Amino acid sequence: MVVTDLDGTLLDHYSYDFKPAMSVVGALKRLGIPLVFNSSKTYAEMRYLQDQMGLLDPMICENGSAIYLPKERFHVAQAAWENHGDFWRISLAKPREHWLSILSEYPDQASILSFSYMGVQGVMNATGLDWTESERASQREYTEPLMPPTNDNIKQDLIAYLGGRGAMVQQGGRFMTVGDSVDKGRAMETLICLWNQKYGGEVRTLALGDGLNDLAMLEKANRSVWIRSPANPTPDFVVQKNWQITQACGPAAWAEATQMWLEQHAHRASSNKVKEPYG
Ligand SMILES: [Mg+2]
């Protein structure tokens, strides 16, 4: 199983291009090796990307908030799985509405510029995404991004308020994201358990990422690859690990590292090939 971050990893940091990775994505498909997206993106954003790449694999959305399993592979749902189109949804976090209601009780409402407050047009203005991209990014189920208040005292007060009500606040490049206490690594562990239950044995995992929120995921994999970022230096923590650090950046580096892993594991993969319809 390949578990991957998207922005800056499978997608180019600047252009979001993934073409340099497509031949290796095709090789994974032919071998029946699932390619699991694990990022802060929403279900709508990930489904759109899967469609473009011709994939129908499990996904982990909104920073480990939920796992989505394709019904094509998982025919029978377990008790807590919810119906979600072609997928079963397994929630690992409280819903977005919970955090919206906590945000709505914050005394200084003028300082809260959230996605739900901004609307699609506001998200367009704040992100530079086009209308349909902003719409997909706005279809959040578990987390709420906010523009950080420009006044640092107000910002610290808001973070303390949210922390006191059980929220985890993640600081991103542009937004701070409010949600439950989850991470990409714990969600990946849960997915691996479900996968092993269904297919037997222990699935071997390759994980690839380029950001601090990928560390928990990289810790849980059999093989971990740090994709060098054109924007940020590689953290010392990563350098000290026995992980592969790529020379190139983005999808080209992703393809090279995944191809190398495939060559080392292809014999095992082809003998485990899943005999099920594959999208
Ligand atoms: Mg990234």
Image (cartoon, rainbow, N blue to C red):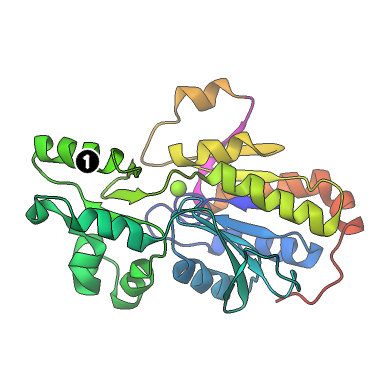
Say if the magenta span includes residue 243: yes
Q: Is residue 257 visible?
A: no
| Badge 1: residue crowd in 10 Å (few <14, some 14–19, many ≥20) | some
Q: Residue 79 falls in which quadrant of the image?
A: bottom right
Residue type at mark 1 is Tyr
Q: Nearer the viewer, residue 214 or 244?
A: 214
Which of the two residues, 51 or 193, is positioned nearer the viewer here? 193
78, 225: nearer the viewer: 78
Q: Residue at x 48, y 45 (%)?
A: 182
**Total numbered badges shown on the rendered structure:** 1
| Rendering quarter of residue 125 | bottom left
Q: Quadrant of the C terminus?
A: bottom right
Task: Give the percent coordinates (x, y) of residue 198.
Answer: 81, 59
Q: Looking at the picture, how far across and down is residue 171, in whole percent?
A: 31, 42
Residue 87 drawn above or below residue 207:
below
Residue at label 1? 161
Which residue is pictured at 58% across the width and 49% down the height?
A: 187
Residue 63 lies in the magenta-colored region: no
**Residue 5 as seen in the image, left or right of residue 2:** left
Q: Percent x, y for residue 238?
A: 52, 27
- Residue reaching furthest to the right: 271
Q: In the structure shown, which secondary structural element does the residue marked by tag 1 occupy?
A: helix
Q: Is residue 133 left or right of residue 183?
A: left
Residue range corresponding to the magenta coloring: 242-250
Decide if residue 20 is on the left or right side of residue 211. right
Residue that appears at 62% across and 66% down: 81
Residue 21 picture quarter: bottom right
Q: Main secondary structure of the magenta part?
A: strand
Residue 191 visible in rendering:
yes
Q: Is residue 257 above or below residue 134?
A: above
